[in-house]
Amino acid sequence: MIVDKDTKIYVGGTLIKEVYQGENKIYDNIPYIKLNYLESDGVQYINTGIIPNSKIKINVKYQALPLSVQPSDYPELFGSLNDWWGPGFTYVHYRKASNSLDVVFSDDDLALARVVPFDNREHTLSIQYQQVIFDGVKYTNPYQLVATMKYPIYLFMGNVLGQPQSTLTGSCSKIYYFQIWNDNILVRDFIPVLDKQGIPCFYDKVTKTCFYNQGEGQFIYG
């Protein structure tokens, strides 16, 4: 951007960019513009870099789009799978056949399957060792999470054998926030943002790093 006079850009009363004599000056006191959510159409995903273990806790606020628009057979809100048929599963997906939400957080593929009927409203979900809290309601998990997961959690689709599987696990979902705790230590605290270049991504308040789409296209946002 070339201008012949001073130009200052404010967001919420905070100066984030100043242009003077044709040069951009970016202010680090606000590295992003906060959004309400990021939305995937089934081919975008985020690599959290965190491999699940028995001490992991996950908090997420999400909204699934209707099953009729889900692009894959097993659309996952997030997931990490050691293999298609185990052992080793950590995922949340929308089961089309039974119109339900499946929460699987163990070495048994049926653990906590069909927790609640599926719908496309906003929900909060908290998952940890032998317990799931869905919209404030507790569900006890009789199974134990396998402690030998191999691959990091992906958001908006499953990480299967270290690879994104958009055609099989990609989901049309909105995520409003996503937190990962490891042994009671917050290791990821994702919020949806536009970075300084206007690219939609998740900003991690723990590492102070932007995590970008690793798939195709670009996230929808709002």
Image: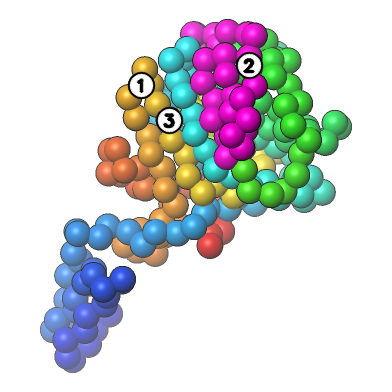
Q: CA distance from mark 3 to mark 1?
A: 9 Å
Q: Residue at x 49, y 8 (%)?
A: 147
Badge 2 amino acid = Thr
| Crowdedness near tag 1: few (<14), some (14–19) or many (≥20) residues, C-alpha within 10 Å | few
Instruction: Report helix, strand or loop for mark 2.
Output: strand
Badge 1 amino acid = Asn
Q: Is 139 in the magenta?
A: yes
The residue pinned by badge 1 equals 184
Q: Earlier in the sequence, mark 3 or mark 2?
A: 2
- At which x and y percent is residue 15? 21, 72
| Crowdedness near tag 2: few (<14), some (14–19) or many (≥20) residues, C-alpha within 10 Å | few
Q: Give the quarter of the image for residue 181.
A: top left
The residue pinned by badge 2 equals 140
Q: Give the quarter of the image for residue 12.
A: bottom left
Please report the bounds of the magenta region as a residue range: 124-150
Q: CA distance from mark 2 to mark 1?
A: 19 Å
Q: Which mark is residue 144?
A: none
Count the labels in the image: 3
Q: Is 20 in the magenta?
A: no
Spot the residue most to the bottom: 4
Instruction: Report helix, strand or loop for mark 1.
Output: loop
Q: Is residue 101 above or below residue 130?
A: below
